[in-house]
Image: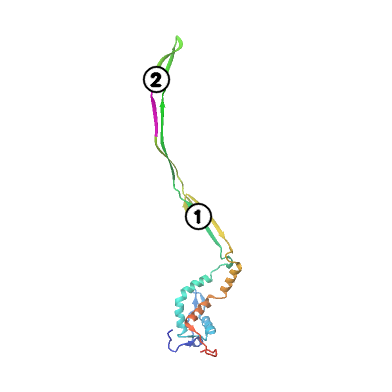
Amino acid sequence: MFNSSGYPRRIDEQIDEYISPSPISDITDNNGNVILSSNLLLSYLYHTYGNYKSNAPISQLWFMYDAIHHADFLKAWAAWTAEYNPLENYNGIETNVRQYMDGDETETITHGKTTTNSTGAGGIVSVTQVTTFDSTTPRDDTKTTNTGTTTATDSGTTATGKVKTTKNLTVGETTYTADKIEAETNTRHGNLGVTTSQQMITSETEMRLNPLITMYIDTFVSEYCYYITDFWGCCE
């Protein structure tokens, strides 16, 4: 690492020389709210890492570090401060939607029937009989005889149809359109057996007792500062 003129120097020595205003800015969130003031940041560095050394002024190193990592820190901070119940972090709603879009139905009937009528050997005889005023005995007036065959053919096609009307179904904020729609919503709540309640509480406790802001500062020190002792355990 490049050494600035007059460095390396201990962090506490550098901070002792700082005058107001602080050369290190406050740590803020996306809305400009102060997460940690510059005075508290310097105090944490002083009392926790005062004996550490840096090869350049920590104000310059912090500016570079924060410029590189601040966007990622803000995303982590938003997740860290999100409101939720650790014992119900498996809650959720699952919706299954089945849509059927078959369209109109058409049935086609094909006709191919042929009917043949045949007369007997003597044919079909039609006789009309009449009577007169002077005789009540019927006598033939006209006689018709039909012979041969007659054929009737039924051909062509007939189409019958069923028109389907689409329907709308709104599930949540989404509207579905289809001939037939089925929706099923399943609500999950609380611990589903994937993780025990005790494990969720333990994870929550471990997270809250290791503040994100201190991890952010500790990472800065691990990247840009170092600590060396001599044989007797005193600071170099």
Image vertical order of residue 210 relative to residue 193, above or below? below
Q: How many marks?
A: 2
Left or right of 157? Residue 197 is right
Main SS of the magenta segment? strand
Name the element at disc 1: strand
Say which label, 1 or 2, has the lower sequence index.
1
Name the element at disc 2: strand
Disc 2 residue type? Thr
Residue 55 rendering spot, x and y as whole percentages: 45, 85
Magenta segment includes 107: no
Q: Are marks 1 and 2 in contact (CB under 8 Å)?
A: no
Q: Quadrant of the N terminus?
A: bottom left
Q: Residues within 10 Å of mark 1 (few under 14, many from 20)?
A: few
Residue positioned 44% across, 76% down in the render: 68
Q: Residue furthest top?
A: 134
Q: Does any portion of residue 152 appear in the rendered image?
A: yes
Residue 169 rendering spot, x and y as whole percentages: 50, 53
Frontmost residue, 114 versus 106: 114
Q: Residue furthest right?
A: 198
Image vertical order of residue 235 relative to residue 187, above or below? below
Q: Gap between marks 1 and 2, in whole Å?
A: 74 Å
Residue positioned 47% across, 75% down in the render: 70
Magenta segment includes 147: yes
Residue numbers of the magenta segment: 146-154
Residue positioned 57% across, 73% down in the render: 206
Q: Which residue is mark 1?
A: 97
Q: Which residue is mark 2?
A: 145
